Image: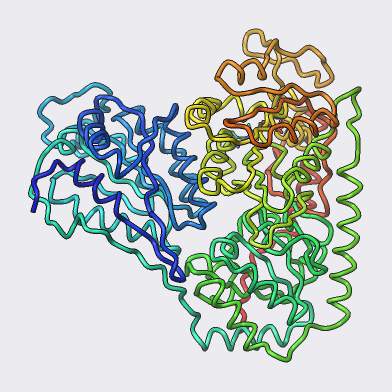
């Protein structure tokens, strides 16, 4: 027993937690990010100061940003490690809510330690406290409940022990991973108690590879053997489980083609003859055509988001059936699929053995290979298209340059705007481990790019990291650039300026609303000029902004200059921002797919009425996929 404060006990506990998978161990909590205020400076701040050798501490600039660093790190480490994040009470705490939602939506472990108001209630109302008349137990931290996989408010010192252990269990369980929130009342943090020695001893959280039930496997095998047009949809779970080799082996043995979700992009390297690339709303022709005709769809490690399913319109075979390999029963049950609950790698190996000797219909395999080859040709065509406006390159050309600079092991990081859809279609994935493509598209959160990219680099210092960020996303959360400068994290940030929200502008035009409110323009009395061709832009200088935050900045205008800047950024000892203007209107087309964005049913505008007609036509293809595999 030793007498420690709650904060000291927690810091010492976090410093000695490890995960283990396949005999490999690593720190579960690599360190702690934080921003101090009265709600954590004396409790956790004191403990982190005292134990900084055991648990490294890094100051951040925005609480949301620091959660993104943790999420980026966790994804790159395949969910085996993450960071803790400590905040003050009130605004510091609620600034983390968006980060928590991002982590939970993407099934990524992050540990959040928001400060909380007094457990004793004596000094209440304390600075930054929300008073909820009628319920004294409510605090703003209750906002974390719906966005956390585990939530506990530690109101007594002894409570820490159970809370901390449960927090580690949830963080390290691939079936439960997401944000874990331990709300820490500021008085309790500083309170001392007798801490059992065993609580502070090193602890290993082993991640066992759970095999699937033999019955589920044989049912899946029966379904697949009976299929004429089977298709695999690879999701993020394939990569987190390190199952890319097993996937390739299954594909080589059976001839089943593979389409990829956003999180699963790169699960099969792009040059594989049966790699269809992107599928769904941001998919290509190969993925979407084979999806339309597939009769058995095997989802592996996917949560079947609307982008993957093209808002439930991608799979059009009237009797299509789904097989869902997933470590989470919740996701395995979707699309009325046959749930095959288990680790992706083990299950893919099991599937290969139960399907031994069987190969897909030759005509289907040949069609898949032809569509895949035709799609690769289309990608080559699109990445070479110049912008239409004098001098400005297209975003597709910019992506090609990043792709070339990244080579086999570089990682591209992106989250929101027009770039994720373009990347999903165009990225040539070369890394056999599937780690070259890091697009956060579960929450698609503007502002994730820079801190997320920092987390990736901290998790994989041996890889070059290329952050692709739009001007809108950049403006939302540029502050973590300072954190990257302070920690000397050498990421390359390609800042693509098209003077506003090109993606939402295009979406607005497609629903008949002329790009309203999506350009950066002077506005009077709240109204924004509607003319999208107007050349008058705001006097913003984002390159100067990045420079002022301490980053090295290279201003480029042409593709040749961009190429040189990317080459010159290698070996830097901190973040390098490569600024480039892109043609706002030279977009990558969409390919035989749809996304459900409801259009006004009545309107005085002809453009909206026309868009509504198109919407109703497409909507008619939406399906519920209610037939179970046994019908
Ligand atoms: C936090 C947040 N707010 C709003 C959105 C909706 N949204 C998606 S993309 C986008 C515009 C992004 O602009 P920019 O980063 O410049 O990229 P571009 O569309 O120009 O490629 C908006 C507002 C979002 N994804 N995240
Ligand atoms: Mg933009």
Image x and y of residue 161, in percent: 19, 54
Q: Quadrant of the image for the C terminus? A: bottom right
Residue nearest the observer in this picture, 589 or 67? 67
Quadrant field for ligand 2: top right
Image x and y of residue 437, in percent: 66, 51
Q: In which quarter of the image is residue 491?
A: top right
Residue nearest the observer in this picture, 390 or 324? 390
Q: Does residue 28 sit above or below 274 in this rendering?
A: above
Q: Residue 319, can we see it?
A: no
At x 19% / y 50%, what residue is drawn?
160
Total marks drawn? 0
At x 20% / y 33%, what residue is drawn?
43
Q: Does residue 275 sit above or below 556 in this rendering?
A: below
Q: Quadrant of residue 7?
A: top left
At x 48% / y 46%, what residue is drawn?
71
Outermost residue to the top: 524
Lateral position of residue 289 relative to residue 124, left or right: right
Q: Quadrant of the image for the N terminus? A: bottom left
At x 79% / y 49%, what residue is drawn?
426
Image x and y of residue 422, in percent: 76, 44
Image x and y of residue 63, in percent: 42, 32
């Amino acid at each position: 027993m030793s007498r420690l404060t709650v904060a000291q006990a927690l810091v010492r506990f976090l410093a000695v937690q490890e995960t283990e998978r396949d005999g490999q161990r690593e720190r579960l909590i690599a360190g702690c990010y934080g921003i101090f205020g009265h709600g954590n400076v004396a409790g956790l701040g004191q403990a982190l100061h005292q134990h900084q050798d055991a648990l490294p501490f890094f100051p951040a600039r925005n609480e949301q940003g620091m959660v993104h660093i943790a999420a980026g790190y966790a994804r790159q480490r395949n969910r085996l490690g993450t960071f803790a994040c400590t905040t003050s009470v009130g605004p510091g705490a609620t600034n983390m809510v968006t980060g928590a939602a991002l982590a939970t939506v993407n099934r990524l472990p992050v540990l959040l330690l928001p400060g909380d108001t007094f457990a004793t209630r004596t000094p209440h109302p304390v600075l930054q406290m929300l008073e909820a008349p009628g319920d004294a137990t409510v605090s703003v931290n209750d906002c974390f409940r719906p966005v956390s996989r585990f939530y506990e408010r530690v109101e007594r010192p002894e409570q820490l022990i159970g809370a901390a252990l449960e927090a580690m269990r949830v963080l390290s369980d691939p079936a439960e991973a997401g944000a874990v929130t331990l709300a820490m009342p500021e008085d309790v943090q500083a309170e001392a108690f007798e801490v059992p020695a065993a609580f502070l001893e090193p602890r290993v959280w082993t991640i066992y590879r759970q095999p699937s039930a033999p019955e589920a496997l044989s049912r899946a095998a029966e379904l697949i053997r009976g299929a004429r047009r089977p298709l695999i949809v690879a999701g993020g779970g394939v990569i987190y489980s390190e199952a890319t080799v097993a996937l390739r082996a299954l594909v080589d043995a059976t001839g089943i083609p593979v389409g990829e979700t956003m999180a699963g992009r790169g699960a099969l390297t792009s040059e594989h003859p049966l790699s269809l690339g992107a599928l769904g709303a941001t998919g290509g022709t190969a993925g979407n055509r084979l999806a339309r005709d597939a009769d058995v769809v095997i989802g592996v490690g996917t949560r079947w988001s609307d982008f993957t399913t093209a808002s439930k319109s991608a799979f059009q075979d009237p009797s299509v059936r789904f097989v869902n390999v997933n470590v989470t029963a919740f996701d395995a049950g979707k699309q009325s699929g046959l749930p095959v609950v288990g680790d992706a790698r083990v299950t893919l190996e099991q599937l290969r053995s139960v399907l031994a000797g069987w190969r897909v219909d030759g005509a289907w395999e040949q069609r898949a290979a032809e569509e895949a080859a035709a799609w690769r040709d289309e990608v080559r065509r699109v990445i070479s298209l110049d912008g239409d406006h004098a001098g400005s390159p297209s975003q597709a050309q910019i992506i090609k340059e990043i792709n070339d600079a990244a080579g086999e092991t570089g990682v591209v990081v992106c989250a929101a705007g027009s770039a994720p859809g373009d990347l999903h279609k165009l990225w040539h994935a070369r890394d056999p481990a599937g780690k070259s493509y890091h697009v956060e598209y579960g929450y698609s959160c503007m502002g994730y790019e820079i801190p997320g990219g920092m987390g990736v680099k901290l998790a994989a210092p041996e890889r070059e990291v290329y952050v692709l960020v739009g001007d809108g996303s950049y403006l939302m959360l540029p502050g973590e650039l300072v954190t990257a400068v302070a920690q000397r994290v050498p990421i390359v940030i390609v800042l693509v300026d098209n003077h506003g929200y090109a993606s939402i502008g295009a979406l607005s035009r497609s629903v008949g609303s002329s790009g309203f409110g999506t350009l950066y323009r002077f506005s009077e009395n709240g109204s924004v000029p509607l003319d999208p061709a107007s050349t008058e832009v705001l006097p913003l200088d984002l390159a100067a902004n990045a420079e002022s935050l301490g980053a090295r900045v290279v201003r480029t205008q042409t593709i040749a200059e961009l190429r040189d800047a990317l080459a010159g950024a290698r070996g830097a000892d901190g973040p390098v921002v490569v600024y480039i203007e892109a043609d706002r209107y030279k977009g990558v087309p969409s390919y035989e797919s749809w996304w459900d964005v409801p259009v006004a049913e009545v309107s005085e505008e002809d453009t909206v009425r026309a868009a509504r007609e198109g919407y109703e036509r497409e909507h008619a293809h939406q399906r519920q996929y209610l037939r179970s595999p046994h019908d």
